[in-house]
Every structure is written in structure tokens, then in C-alpha cells.
Image: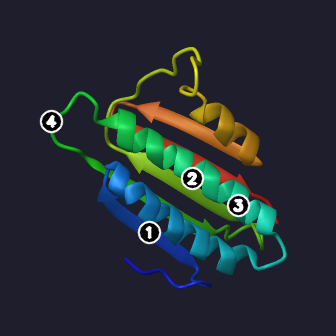
Amino acid sequence: MLVGEGEEMLHLEVPATPAYVGRLRRAVRGWLRGALGENDPDAVDNLTLAVSEALENAAEHAYADRDEPGTMTLSAQRDPVRTGSVVISVSDSGSWRSPSEPNGYRGRGLALIEELSDAHTVRPGPTGTTVTLRHPA
């Protein structure tokens, strides 16, 4: 799973396990460096961490009621309408679990995603959940 910097689109589907979170995080960081350039290293770091949180949520929670892991998909592309903007989504086909009250170090993933991204949506549904992050030009 190698992704070159500067590609217009990134699309990866892998088993939803913690072992793949790091691989996808590195892939999206490389893609973001190419998409956003060296001019916005803070955005690369923030979006990478936000995507990592979404991936970790999918790996940990989406298939908790199953014996075998399902899949998680990472897609990123340059916004075709807004030059210089990017849209990143993380999706799974598992079950949504409503966030619980934060206790200790757990339960802060969605709040962290909100703080790290300029705009985001979380769409749970009967066929899975999709988290979409947008970064303007």
C-alpha cells in the first residue's frame, strides 16, 4: 500500500483493525503533503490526527458486535469545485455506537476531530458510518 505525494485522489480499503490505522495515517499524511504542499504543515498535522481518530473509531467500535473485523475505507481528493481545498472521508459498514460521556482518556475522539478540522460531518446509518472532513483553500 504505497501512495505517492501529489496524486489527485487517494482511496484505500483495508480490514478495520488497529494494525491498519497507522498504515492509513501514514498514507494520508503523504497524500496531504502533496495536496496542500509545504505551505500549510499545521493543516497536514491537524487533518492527519483527525483522520487517525476517525480510523481508530472505526477499528475499535464499528464491528465490536462481530467476531471478524469488517472493512474501513479512507478516501481523499482535491475538491473539484474549490481549488486548493481537500475532502477526506473515513467510512465503515458497521454499527454506530453513540458517544458516551468522557471518562478518563476515552471518549474524546469526535471532540478532537471537531477541533482539528475546519468542517466535518458524521453520518451514521443502517449501512455504516462516514466521517467527512473538509479543509478550505
Describe the element under mark 4 as helix, strand or loop: loop
State the separation of the CA atoms marked 1 and 4. 26 Å
Q: Amino acid at mark 4?
A: Asp
Above-or-below relation of 109 to 40: above
Nearer the viewer's eye, disc 3 or disc 1? 3
Describe the element under mark 1 as helix, strand or loop: strand
State the separation of the CA atoms marked 2 and 1. 13 Å
User: Pointer 2 and pointer 1: residues touching (CB < 8 Å)?
Assistant: no
Q: What residue is shown with label 1? A: 11
Q: What residue is shown with label 4? A: 67
> Are there few (<14), some (14-19), or many (20+) residues within 10 Å of tag 3?
some
Q: Amino acid at mark 1?
A: His
Describe the element under mark 3 as helix, strand or loop: helix
Q: Which of the two discs, 3 and 2, labels the residue nearer the N terminus?
A: 3
Q: Which of the two discs, 3 and 1, labels the residue nearer the N terminus?
A: 1
Q: Amino acid at mark 3?
A: Asp
Say whether residue 125 is left or right of residue 131: left
Residue 89 position within the rendered picture, expressed as x and y whole percent measured from the top left: 53, 54
State the separation of the CA atoms marked 3 and 1. 19 Å
Judge by depth and name the residue closer to the eye, 58 or 91.
Answer: 58
The residue that appears at 52% across and 16% down in the rendered structure is 100
Mark identifier at residue 45? 3
State the separation of the CA atoms marked 3 and 2. 10 Å
Judge by depth and name the residue closer to the eye, 7 or 47.
Answer: 47
Q: What residue is shown with label 2? A: 51
Nearer the viewer's eye, disc 2 or disc 1? 2
The residue that appears at 47% across and 20% down in the rendered structure is 98
Q: Which of the two discs, 3 and 4, labels the residue nearer the N terminus?
A: 3
State the separation of the CA atoms marked 4 and 2. 25 Å
